[in-house]
């Protein structure tokens, strides 16, 4: 089985300690994204599918899940453009909640990395465009089903940082259980 490419931890984006709100938010998100890349790097398909009981989470599943989350927030909620492939063909009403975790077991490290990198690239393009239009106060097209309010780009960026940070904690534990790597 092929292994995912190695990620050079020294190339990980560091969030700036000073700068504009946009620079700090984007730098923090890039740092979290790179942390996930690092935690998933250099592993085989079998290792990316390895669980750390009692959870069914896997590192490959986290890559696919966060690819979905990128599309959910930037393609769906923010732009109302639907989901990006392969999520656009999933019948979400008929599948289990953990579809991305289960289906990731059938994906190669290269496929998972490409999916993740494409999702991040698409999201960054959406962010770039929104910043030129209305900055961090640019509002989503769709509204929250809970409040009926729109989401600001600022809120989505903070939420994405939180989402990655939480899942990177899971990734730390899973990676350590696979090969002892910590950090």
Image (cartoon, helix red, strand yellow):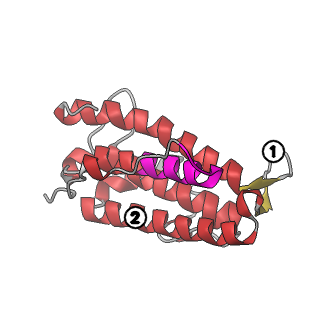
Q: Residue at x 64, y 49 (%)?
A: 21
For disc 1, the neighbor class at 10 Å (few under 14, some 14 to 19, many from 20) is: few
- Of the residues tagged 1 and 2, which is closer to the observer? 2
Tell me residue 76's x, y (percent).
66, 64
Q: Is residue 124 left or right of residue 141?
A: left
The alpha-carbon separation of the residues under discs 1 and 2 comes to 31 Å
Q: Is residue 39 left or right of residue 73?
A: left
Q: Secondary structure at mark 2?
A: helix
Q: Residue at x 63, y 45 (%)?
A: 158
Q: Pick the residue in front: 140 or 71.
A: 140
Main SS of the magenta part reads helix
Q: Is residue 128 left or right of residue 98?
A: right
Q: Which quadrant, please, contains the C terminus? A: top left
Q: Pick the residue in front: 126 or 144.
A: 126
Tell me residue 161's x, y (percent).
55, 44
Tell me residue 111's x, y (percent).
31, 65
Magenta stretch encompasses residue 73: no
Which quadrant holds residue 125?
bottom right
* Residue placed furthest toward the front: 18
Q: Which residue is mark 2?
A: 117
Q: Secondary structure at mark 1?
A: loop
* Residue placed furthest toward the top: 54
Q: Residue at x 19, y 51 (%)?
A: 42
Tell me residue 163's x, y (percent).
54, 42
Q: Residue at x 52, y 70 (%)?
A: 122
Range of residues picked out in magenta: 18-33
* Residue placed furthest toward the left: 1
Q: Earlier in the sequence, mark 1 or mark 2?
A: 2
Instruction: Check residue 146 in the rendering and tell me which mark sits there, or answer none.
Output: 1
Q: Are marks 1 and 2 in contact (CB under 8 Å)?
A: no
Is 75 located above or below residue 22 in the figure? below
């Amino acid at each position: 089985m092929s292994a995912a490419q190695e990620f050079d931890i020294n190339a990980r984006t560091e969030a700036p300690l000073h700068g504009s709100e946009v620079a700090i938010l984007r730098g923090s998100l890039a740092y979290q994204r790179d942390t996930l890349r690092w935690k998933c790097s250099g592993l085989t398909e079998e290792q990316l599918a390895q669980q750390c009981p009692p959870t069914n989470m896997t590192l490959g599943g986290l890559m696919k899940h966060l690819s979905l989350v990128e599309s959910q927030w930037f393609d769906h909620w923010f732009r109302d453009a639907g989901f990006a492939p392969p999520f656009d063909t999933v019948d979400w009403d008929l599948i289990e909640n953990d579809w991305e975790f289960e289906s990731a077991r059938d994906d190669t490290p290269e496929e998972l990395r490409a999916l993740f990198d494409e999702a991040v690239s698409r999201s960054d393009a959406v962010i770039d465009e929104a910043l030129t239009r209305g900055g961090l106060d640019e509002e989503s097209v769709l509204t929250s089903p809970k409040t009926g309010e729109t989401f600001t780009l600022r809120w989505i960026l903070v939420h994405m940082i939180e989402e990655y940070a939480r899942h990177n904690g899971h990734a730390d534990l899973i990676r350590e259980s696979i090969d002892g790597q910590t950090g």
